[in-house]
Amino acid sequence: MADHTPPLESGQLLSPELPILASPPPPAMVNGEGPQQVILVQVNPGEAFTIRREDGQFQCITGPAQVPMMSPNGSVPPIYVPPGYVSQIIEENGVRRVLVLPQQPEFHPGGHSPLHHPPPPPHAHLPAFIPHPAMMPPPPHLYTGMAGGVGDMSSQYISQYHPAHIYSEQGKMNPAVSGLHCYIIYLDDRTSKTHERLQKKLKERQAGGGGQVKDSPPPSPQKTCNSPLTADIHNGIGGKGSETGKGKNGESGGKEVSDIQARGAVVSWSAPNRPEGENGSMENDCSPPENLSFEVSISVSGKDGKYQSMYCGGEPSATLEDLRPATDYHVRVQAMCNCLQGSPSEAVSFTTLSCEPDPPNPPRKASGTKNTLVLQWKAPCDNGSKIQNYILQWDEGKGTGTYEQCYYGPQKQYRVTKLSPASRYSFRLAAKNDIGVSEFSEVVDLFTSCSVPLPPFPPELEMTGVTWLCLKWQRPTSSPKEDDIYYILEMEEEGSGYGFQPSYDGDELTCTVRNLHRSTKYKFRVAAYNSEGKSNPSQVVEFITNPDRPSCPCRPVIRGRVLPNSFKMAWGELSLTSLSWGPVYSGPAMEHVCEGLKPGCSYQTRVYCMSEGGQSPLSETLQVQTPAVPPGPCQPPRLVGKPKAREVQLRWGPPQVDGGSPVSCYCVEVSGPQSEESREVYQGPELDCSVGGLMPGKTYSFRLKAANKAGFGPLSERCEVTTGPGAPEQCKSPSTTCKSPSCVVVSWEAPPCNGAPVTEFRLEWGAAEGCMQTCYTGSGLSHEVKGLLPATNYFCRVQAVNVAGVGLFSEAVLCQTPCSVPAAVSNIYVLKESELNSRPPPVYSPSTCLGICWDPPCDHGSEITSYLIDLGERQPVVVGPVTKHIIQHLQPDTSYRSVIRIQALNSLGAGPFSHTFKLKTKPLPPQPPRLECTAFSHQTLRLKWGDGPAKAVTSDALQYQLQMGDKSGRFISLYKGPCHTHKVQRLNESTSYTFRIQAFNEAGEGPFSNVYTFTTPRSPPAPVKAPKVERVDDNSCEVTWEALPPMKGDPVIYTLQCMMGNSEFKQVLAYKGAATSFHVQNLQSSSDYRFRVCAIRQCQDAPELSGPYSPTVTLSPQRNDVALSGSAAGSGSRTGIESNRARQSLTDEQCAFLLLMVFAVIAILIAFVIQYFVIK
């Protein structure tokens, strides 16, 4: 329970006859130094709430109103209630609610008589809660229970209050609250929003309705949880909502809802007052104008929902009827004068009372026998109170209209037993809840089953068909109409031997038996049965089905061979058509010859027959195709255009008779002028063709014939065509004669001229067969070709020309010129240094040797046997058929020009010398420098060579290569560049390493130096972490430190040093050993001491190596301070003891983590700057 604060003062006492629950308000405000919680005070209409302001004046606030109060210390004020009531604080989801409840063991939401008490005097300590006018939220939604008397309440309404922490307190008899329904501590804004959202969803669901589950009772019109209701309950029979005030701009004044019933209520109101005058005074005349009328409208979907007009008139009250029980309504009034409408008044909410359920539907028969009936029914609308029991009454089968109760209980079905067979019983149903009993449903008559029925009369024939019979029969006369009787129709086919078989089973009195045979006798009988048994069958009757028309005949067939103009058909009456159906024969014959047909046409035939039963269906269609004949003769082909020397263009038309099949091909034949034999020159579907391969100036005969799928027709008449003159014939192959390696004579013969003399010849010459060029044009029969290459293949061909055109070229002739001496060497190159030493030893030095290579020249048909290299003053050098040679014993750094040339030789002699070219030898490579070790450690060696600077630019001509030997004796390159120093890292301690160096420049790589050996020293121990110092007493302490592992078998000892004050370090008690802790004694309690530790490596064959000292740790003196508190507080004393802790340095992991966090922060800042200033 929160701290108690002075109670609020009021001018009138609240009558808390019902528990009131307010909706969650906004969250708590924070003002000043601490949180201030806002509390809403709800003032009902007609009540007053008195507060005391900061200036000491009292202010009376009349309802309806909400007064926001702020609690400075966040506590809940005590609630003082009249006798017989108790206040309870419910804490749920962070929200505390104060409920004023009757002091009784159970919570009943029924109506109670209001209690009236005189207003108490103002309280003196009211300023503990400060009014906050700026925070005036709308009135909270209140919740009250169902009115209608004190009684049991269904669990579905009690479940609105969830289990919560409840704190009860019963105040003194101090009526200090008037119009105050509850206090709500504003704790969480999310709770308020969640409550409002649930309120909205529940209202929408109630207004829109929902689907009703099958076989479930209709939904009871329940109130919305925490629904708005500002009405008080009076006399335990209904609610009353009222609103008083002055009307503005035609708004109605006070409203009151009284006499609230389950399906009606009375609404009364006062006429709106006139507006204030110009001087600000209120007129006293409140009588409404003569033409003033009022409109009353209600809403079932909330205060802001859709309103429906229920009354319109001039009376200041109205009776609302046809309302739904246990439903929340909002009512408002609107004044109207002539054509002017005033503003609607504030909506007043009320809830109709619960009542008895609606009349249920009559029960229905689920099943039954001749002695029992099983009844079922559905639940009606409960009208706000859960249905507890159902009342089922019956007339016991007497039919007198007097009903007795046969069932009373909550079930929705009941079995009535011990009934008489084939009897009628009347039933009716009523529902009961806590309010009362509903009206009875309509009376329903139900029948029990009877005994086995008598045999029915024989079935009668109603209609007949070829494959079906329609029968009917009558119900047995002895069976009552209420009895459910079913029938079995049995049938026997004559001659089947299977006896009677059931063909129908049902409650109908007619049946159509299908799938029967035509013109067949059938026997029938019928039997009746019910739930008690089956009767004997009726007498047997016989019925015959109608005869059927003849069946469809088979498809007609062909007799004999189908001729182009006729064919023979077999079977029945015949219909024959080519384009449309039409009869061609009718008679008793079984075959018919169809004549006068066209070749190559398609005919369809079908047959049907007739008898006494009617005409049969048509048979399947037979497709008959008469064979086609070859087409008739064509007209002779005609010449198109002027005839050419070797080609003519012909054209023709289709034949007049196609033979019953479209022409698919044409054939053209030609015969020569001196031969009667014909040859085919074209065959295809086109109506024109080009005939080639003819002789110029000759006469040819052409004939044409057409063909279809039956074959070729006769040839047409001849067509004579004479070709024109043509170009000369193809020349024979020319002959060639070689006069020298560079000269050839070509000769040829004249070809046939084809009617026109040859005017010239054209000779083509070339080194390749596909790229020859014209070298001669004239009338001669020979030509001399000069300027050729020795031992080379050439091609030539000749062509004749006359006035008609150009003849074809002769076949190409190959001509090869004789061999000759080689050509001159044209391209000479100098070998690179890598190519110079690519051969196996000996190794050639570029300073005294020059390597040359050249491209082999053309050998002119004879293989090159050797090369002659002329060196000027030196003896010429003869080499074999190679393209490389190394000239040795030259002077270093010397230029050779205009003295070196090369000549190629073959079996026919020596070719010309090449041009002279320039060569120069390189200088001698440098010697290796001396290698020295200038600095060393247990892991590194710094080497130096030469006299130059430590760092050199890459443009230096002289560079160096440093190599180090590995365990296998091989040397690995460590450095290559112009620098004179190099630091070798990642070495092992106390290990010897071998090195060698080499100098090189553009002249080449010099020799390697002698092998140098350098040894790394031993490594000292690692630094020890800061020791830990713990004080044992005033004059001694314990110093400990971490141990280091042995180093390659060498033990490690430690040295501890101590310093007092600012003096120099000295060894404490000359301690030096392998222990990791030491007890220091004889310390002065008032002095500061500092300690540090050093590790020492004890080498076996070398002096000791000391490592660096650890960080210094300080041991401060121990101090005691005693402080006494002031005399006002008492004589208590407090002693502070400060412990001295050793100052420790950060570990490696902590340092790495700290650096990582710093880098991460810097990276985030840089990314933010780039995002904000660069990207945006």
Image (cartoon, helix red, strand yellow):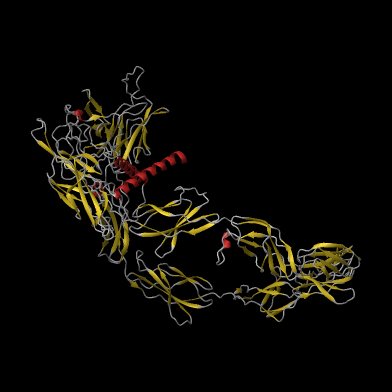
Compare residues 1084 and 872 and report the one nearer the observer: 872
Q: Residue at x 62, y 77 (%)?
A: 554
Q: Is residue 1071 above or below residue 649?
A: above
Q: Is residue 221 above or below residue 419?
A: above
The answer to which image quadrant residue 984 occupies is bottom left
> Which of the image's four quarters has the N terminus?
top left
The answer to which image quadrant residue 43 occupies is top left
In the image, is 299 to the left or to the right of 61?
right
In the image, is 61 to the left or to the right of 707?
left
Is residue 1097 at least partly visible in the picture?
Answer: yes
In the image, is 557 to the left or to the right of 1053?
right
Compare residues 53 and 32 and report the one nearer the observer: 32
Residue 1115 place in picture, x, y as percent: 18, 43
Residue 734 place in picture, x, y as percent: 84, 70
In the image, is 71 to the left or to the right of 1085?
right
- Residue farthest along the left direction in this orientation: 1131
Q: Is residue 1165 above or below residue 548?
A: above
Q: What is the total number of numbered labels drawn onto the structure image?
A: 0
Q: Residue at x 46, y 40 (%)?
A: 1174
Is residue 808 at least partly visible in the picture?
Answer: no
Compare residues 72 and 522 and report the one nearer the observer: 72
Residue 335 place in picture, x, y as percent: 37, 29
Residue 792 place in picture, x, y as percent: 76, 67
